[in-house]
Amino acid sequence: MASYDQCFWANSGYETIRKHNKMNLEFLKEFYQLVQERGDLEKDFSNKLMKLTQRGNKSNHLCLGTIQSAWSKFTGNLESESEIHSKLAASLDTLSKNLAEFHQMQVKDRKALESQFEKHNRNYSDRQSKFKLAQKNQFSKLRELEQYQVALSEARENRIKSTEKDIVKLEGKTKRAEEVGERVSVLFSSTAKSLEDARLGWEGAIYKYARDSQLMEQERINTLSDSLRQYIGMLDMTAPKLQTVCQELSEVVTRISPQSDIQSTCNRVGMGEYLPEQCLYYGYENMEDTALKPETRRLMLERRLTEFEEAILATQKGKVGVQQLSSAYEQTPNFSTATGQDDVRRQLLEMDTLTNFLKASHFIIEKSLLTLTSQSPSNSHLEPYIQIASEGKGLPQSKLKVPIQDVTNIADEQHSSIYQTIPGAVQKVDPSYGKNNLLSAIESFPDESEYGATGYQGPSTEVCDTTSNETLGQCIAQYDYAAQAFDELTIAPGDVISIIEQDDPGWWKGKLNNRIGVFPATYVTQTDA
């Protein structure tokens, strides 16, 4: 069966549902007003019958015998009929008042739904503006860095007349420009993630608006159906001669189905399959036709690659908890409501969508790195869904368009990083690998002999110099934890760990047995010393 949340999406879908809801409310208002007028007619008819009864009673003394008995019966029937129509009028009045209250309740609830969506829509629009501004600022600052680097190269090669003092000044400006470029790039990356969060909130608001509108529409249709049944019952008791009409109307009413009406609405004005449009990270350093130094590009790209790999790991860890909650709901359905279970499924879909965003951005950055370092090109299952084009003033826009029904399947595809760093750089391995993948990745690391005197530094959990990291304190492990990724520590109760970083409230970085890695903060107790 089709549903609103499958057939209506984006702002146009919201407007379609809103107009449809407005039309339904107008019909509901017309319905209860008509019932009210019908009750007024019955009340007026009852009053007139009562007047006829009183008039007939006054004429009772004008006849005698059997005629008088027949006349008394006649006037008595008029009085009984007046009472019947009076009760019908009262029932219709009660029905119209109930419908009017229901109408007001629906108006209030729909306004609340629309207000919530408008709030998310404004937030999403604001984030889009900030995204474009941050991207424009990043391109501007990196172009400025590019100009300084070109000028410095020309000065050093004596292609332009310059003194040693001028070269020193250019070097200082170039260094400051590099620092500014990195800051604006980090800001742009943060803005891109913020935009995706806002887009997910906006998309979730549309989903909830469509879902709740469908529930309200079902309630409205059921209420109308019940009201018509009550009306039929009133007529059936009041006017036996209208039995044929009642039967004809009853046949129509029995065929009322909320599911059928919703299906018809989706078929007539539905928008078809929803195709989300996610704005990916595509920075100035991704572009090949720039004058940025290759080393500068490589360092910036590697930082972004590391950043997105860590984000992928965090998202995958967060998804595990939601999956456990979903499994608990499936095993014990009575533990949660249908709406709660639906919210969990929606949250899983949002996390899969975010995972695709992070993996696609990671793939774009990695592809640029592979091209820059003359390594073999990479492939990704997300590549067919990625579009890169220039918009506005020529700024490239990288977008991911994955059909909503394929989001989960694509997000579950294995993610791996094939980029090999240059000698002396830290090798990155995808944190989502299991133990077997981790072993194979470690086995594929280059030997030290390949790096000459510099040597290969390896991942962060390798044995390291104990004096190279300043500790913030110590903590004692309270529970067992087995490392799930290459950058994690395996701890056991009683282990004393030296704390190096506490930036992440859920994960700390520390040193144990001359190895450095991250571990769950909730598994340890920090000591006073």
Image (cartoon, grey):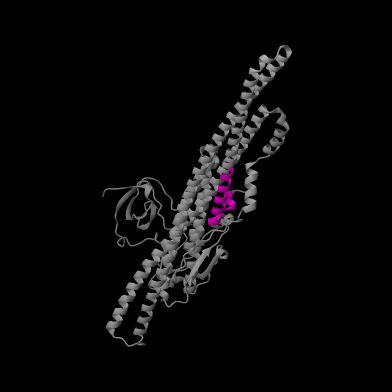
Q: Is residue 24 magenta?
A: yes
Q: Does residue 412 appear anywhere in the picture?
A: no
| Residue 496 percent coordinates (x, y) | 33, 50
Instruction: Find residue 61 and report its image quarter.
Output: top right
Residue 347 located within the stretch drawn in magenta = no
Residue 187 quadrant: bottom left
Residue furthest front in the image: 62
Q: Residue at x 29, y 48 (%)?
A: 527
Foreground of the two, 505 or 23: 23
Pinpoint residue 69: horizontal percent, then vertical percent.
70, 14
Whether residue 145 is situated above or below residue 54 in the rendered picture: below
Q: Position of residue 213 (x, y in %)?
A: 55, 46
Residue at left 56%, top 58%? Answer: 410
The extreme top residue here reads 65
- Asked whether 275 or 107 is in front, the reply is 107
Number of disc labels:
0
Viewer-nearest residue: 266 or 22:
22
| 70 up-or-down from 33: above or below | above
Prevailing secondary structure of the magenta residues: helix
Q: Quadrant of residue 88?
A: top right
Give the magenta range. Answer: 4-28
Q: Residue at x 72, y 36 (%)?
A: 248
Q: Position of residue 143 (x, y in %)?
A: 40, 75
Question: Can you see residue 49?
Answer: yes
Which residue is rendered at x = 33% and y = 74% of the image? 175
